[in-house]
Image (cartoon, helix red, strand yellow):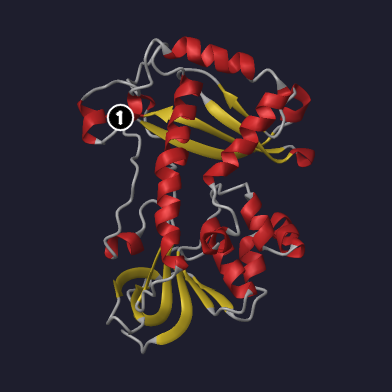
Amino acid sequence: MAQSAHHTQVVICGAGPVSLLVGIVLASHGVQVRILEALSCPSESPRAIVYQPANRVLLQPSVVASLYCQGPSFQLETFANAEISFDSEVIYVSDGSEQGPVCITCKSSQGNTSRITCDWLIGADGSKSIARKIMNIEFAGFTWPKEEFVTTDVLYPFSDFDFTSGKFFVDPVHWGIIAAIDPEKHLWRVAYGWSKTHGRSPGRRSFRPSIVSSTTGTRPESLLNKWPTLRHQAFSEYTNQQSIESKRIVQRGGYSEDPANIWAHDAIAEAHGMTKWLQKATPEAKERDRAMFRLMADESIRLRALLSTWDAALAVDWMNRRKR
């Protein structure tokens, strides 16, 4: 049974960490926000554990502290101008007209439908984004066809074994990433590769990056419209390449055993558009990797390498810089 449409300023598809953080920022600036989530309750699976510097600048210190202690969902609920609607799967999006609002149709698990209109729609509902597909927005990247990425949070005293904030576990087959969530409580994130030759994995996370896309009925010619272009440029020129190269390094791709043929230049890689990303997986990579490991033994070099990763994120004052 369809209901009459309700209007809000901004609707966000998905209630993941990106959606919730965007909702908090907007709500803290007085914007009316509604988040639509297909699941009937908050997901308890492992999610993002890092807040980048840009987020810390955009949010007040008290909000950042609350995010660490209570999570973004709790923080969003403290705003009177923000709400989360669970059991609300987005099934249709229409711009209406050039000057009209964005129209959204949702469906509950019981089959009931409802309509919402908004000035802005933000699609942040993950790698399988229904909002992005409905709006016919291309999603750059690929999902590794022969391997899955399992993430789990564990209680273990990794600090007792000289583990710091995060480390790669280098192995061609049993590779992984171990990162601190709350070392004092021995809470750590352990993420590892699971070859499909081993059977079904305990859980799956896509290697594709999550890209936020937005649409509006008015589409003003302003600096705001440059943001998606600049973010996609940063992704294609740095983030995507660096992520794939990091995976190759921890698996020693190109010069070690590869029983699942993860790095093979075969028909599967061709079909998934992966071939250009496999070019560095050659026997010559062995000496490059060894040289890199020797450099990383220097703590000052490790720090510079860590800081350089933030270049993938645009500066918080990017709009002001473009005005100069």
Q: Quadrant of residue 306?
A: top right
Instruction: Report if residue 316 is visible in the image.
Output: yes
Q: What residue lies at 57% left-to-right and 23% top-to-bottom? A: 169
Left/right placement of residue 176 relative to residue 124 reads right
Instruction: Report if residue 124 is visible in the image.
Output: no
Which of the two residues, 91 or 99, is positioned nearer the viewer here?
99
Q: Residues within 10 Å of mark 1 (few under 14, many from 20)?
A: few
Where is residue 299 drawn, in percent x and y? 72, 24
Which element carries disc 1, helix, strand or loop? helix
Give the answer, above or below, for where 114 lies relative to 15.
below
Image quarter where the N terminus lies is bottom left
Q: What residue lies at 70% left-to-right and 19% top-to-bottom? A: 298
For the residue marked with disc 1, what is the amino acid? Lys
Image quarter where the C terminus lies is bottom right
Which of the two residues, 172 or 314, is positioned nearer the viewer here?
314
Q: Quadrant of residue 205?
A: top left
Residue lying furthest front in this view?
Answer: 324
Q: Which residue is mark 1?
A: 276
Q: What residue lies at 30% left-to-right and 32% top-to-bottom? A: 274
Q: How many marks?
A: 1
Where is residue 296 drawn, in percent x and y? 64, 20
Where is residue 172 drawn, in percent x and y? 46, 17
Q: Quadrant of residue 57?
A: bottom right
Give the answer, above or below, for where 78 lies relative to 123.
below
